Amino acid sequence: MRIAFCISSMGPGGAERVVSIMANYWADVGHDIHIITLSAKDALSVYPLHNSISLVNLDLAEDSPSISDKLLNNIKRIRFVRKALLSIAPDIALSFMDTMNVSTLLAVQGTGIPVIVSEHCHPVQFPIAQGWKQLRQIMYRKAGAVIVLGEDIRQWFADNIATRRLEILFNPVLPCPDTGPRSETTQRIIVAVGRLAEEKQFDKLIQAFAIVASAHAQWSLNIFGEGPDRRVLETLIHDLKMEERIFLRGWVPNISKELKKSDIFAMSSRSEAFPAALCEAMACGLPAVSFDCPSGPAEIIREKIDGILVPPNDVKGLAAGMKNLMTDPKMRREFGLKAAEVADRLSIEATMNRWGKLIEEIRG
């Protein structure tokens, strides 16, 4: 098949990572894959892409200073997405993320190109502007299918937006790549991964670690990612006198290498759709401790089998969960062995087979 992916960019992010995995898988088996983005012409994917994949950057990601500019730029984006899709003439278009989904559905009107749209955020926790919300209400019923990443999100769409077909399809999880044996040291590491932004609530994770840090001098906390809250988090670390124990490591292209150096994965998000970082960490054999936030962690972590769930926003509970794993090497080892099973439970082969069957049914 000829498949076109539509997404705002191929920069760092969960949806972008999923697009790269899906695109590479299908390119490997011989499909003709194109990825359309709004990024600058010379922008590259931060995730490796198969050399046969065509990356089409439309150079339409500029900011809009006024409402009229926003309207004109959105019309321009829809027109250029339409032109790109007509040029590619795909058998199916797969669009990712809310506003890009609406734009793609508007772009294909009258072309006969079937579209499947995929939502990667919880609409309640991450609302879009009113105009986009109204357009989504209208346009999603024109999609061949709407894909969501969890039961909470599915229920919200079932209650609020008319669709032809609504499906839960979890993202594929890759086995942890072999990054070599871990060097044995007395130092122990808790790791967290995500955008340094309010929704990830790394301030709560930092506070939780600070509660237990003094009694566990061999442990440190590494947070990987970049974002607007870096300075706020740096200030918090300074105020807690944790500069020698908590580190903001920035974004790295090969997070698996860092995960393999770590002992526990911690997640403090306000909400998730499908936490890819959690899955990657568990696939690398890390036991997890996480807020049981809306949609995501409870569908992945098997409580007291491969991880620990604590009530949302409960900083003391998160600290206690980390302490339980920090002080019990046997639990860490047993949970870690079970955690790695996520790569079998949500294997790329099983996930992509479901995608393939869905596409066949939509095209049929």
Image (cartoon, rainbow, N blue to C red):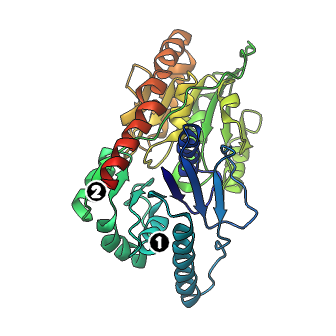
| Quadrant in the picture for residue 55 | bottom right
Rendering coords of residue 217 (x, y %): 70, 22
Give the percent coordinates (x, y) of residue 197: 59, 55
> Callout 2: few (<14), some (14-19), or many (20+) C-alpha neighbours within 10 Å?
few
Q: Is residue 120 above or below residue 342?
A: below
Residue drawn at the location 43% of the way across and 71% of the way down: 108
Residue bearing mark 1? 103
Instruction: Give the quadrant of residue 265.
Output: top right
The front one of 276 and 345 is 345
Question: How many discs appear?
Answer: 2
Q: Residue at x 59, y 62 (%)?
A: 36
Circle 2: element type: helix
Distance (Cα) linking label 1 and label 2: 21 Å
The image position of residue 147, as x and y in percent, is 36, 52
Q: Could you say where residue 358 lies in the image, as x and y percent from the top left?
A: 34, 46
Q: Which residue is mark 2?
A: 156
Disc 1 element: helix
Mark 1 and mark 2 in contact? Answer it, CB < 8 Å. Answer: no
Question: Which residue is more in the foreground, 282 or 7?
Answer: 7
User: Who is closer to the viewer here, 357 or 40?
Assistant: 357
Residue drawn at (41%, 72%) of the image: 111
Q: Is residue 325 left or right of residue 112?
A: right
Closer to the camera: disc 1 or disc 2?
Answer: 1
**Residue at (42%, 48%) from the top-left corner?**
273
Q: Can you say whether 155 is above or below 218 in the image?
A: below
Residue 310 visible, this orientation = no
- Give the residue at the far left of this rendering: 159
